[in-house]
């Protein structure tokens, strides 16, 4: 019996630390961080799309002003 107790202690000392379960508030904070990151990413993509739309509109107006024939893609 005396031999088993030191082995148990050694095993406990070398064991990886236990991961604590996040509290409800921590889970909510993590959810909000992920939601914010996704919102920022969506906003960035919307900005890129709108910028591209403006650029295409500018090119279209220039073409109409210059009466350049449109190219056809094969």
Image (cartoon, rainbow, N blue to C red):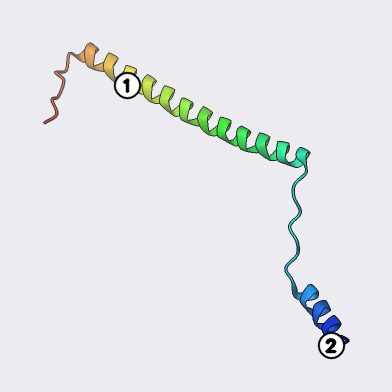
In screen coordinates, is 28 left or right of 50? right
Density class for disc 2 (Cα within 10 Å; few <14, some 14-19, many ≥20) is: few
Residue extending furthest bottom? 3
Q: Is residue 66 above or below residue 40?
A: above
For image coordinates 16% across by 17% down, the residue present is: 68
Q: Is residue 12 above or below residue 22?
A: below
Q: Which element type, helix, strand or loop, lies under badge 2?
A: loop
Residue shown at the point (32%, 21%) measured from the top left? 56
Find residue 37 and name its label: none
User: What residue occupies the far right of the structure in this picture?
Assistant: 2
Residue assigned mark 1: 56
Q: Is residue 31 left or right of residue 59?
A: right
Q: CA distance from mark 1 to mark 2?
A: 80 Å
Depth check: give the residue in front, 27 or 68.
27
Give the x, y percent position of residue 12. Answer: 79, 73
Residue extending furthest left?
A: 74
Label 1 secondary element? helix
The mark nearer the N terminus, 1 or 2, is 2
Q: Nearer the viewer, residue 71 or 12?
A: 12
Residue 26 lies, in percent from the top left, at: 75, 41
With respect to residue 31, does 46 lie above or below?
A: above
- Residue 37 percent coordinates (x, y): 59, 36
| 34 horizontally vs 4: left or right | left
Q: How many marks?
A: 2
Give the label, 1 or 2, closer to the camera: 2
Res 57 quadrant in image: top left
Quarter where residue 25 is shown: top right
Look at mark 2 in the image and give the residue it sits on.
3
């Amino acid at each position: 019996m005396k031999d088993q107790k030191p082995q148990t202690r050694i095993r406990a000392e070398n064991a990886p630390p236990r991961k604590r379960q996040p509290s409800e508030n921590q889970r909510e904070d993590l959810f909000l961080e992920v939601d914010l990151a996704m919102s920022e990413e969506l906003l960035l993509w919307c900005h890129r799309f709108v910028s591209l739309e403006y650029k295409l509109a500018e090119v279209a107006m220039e073409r109409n002003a210059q009466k350049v024939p449109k190219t056809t893609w094969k």
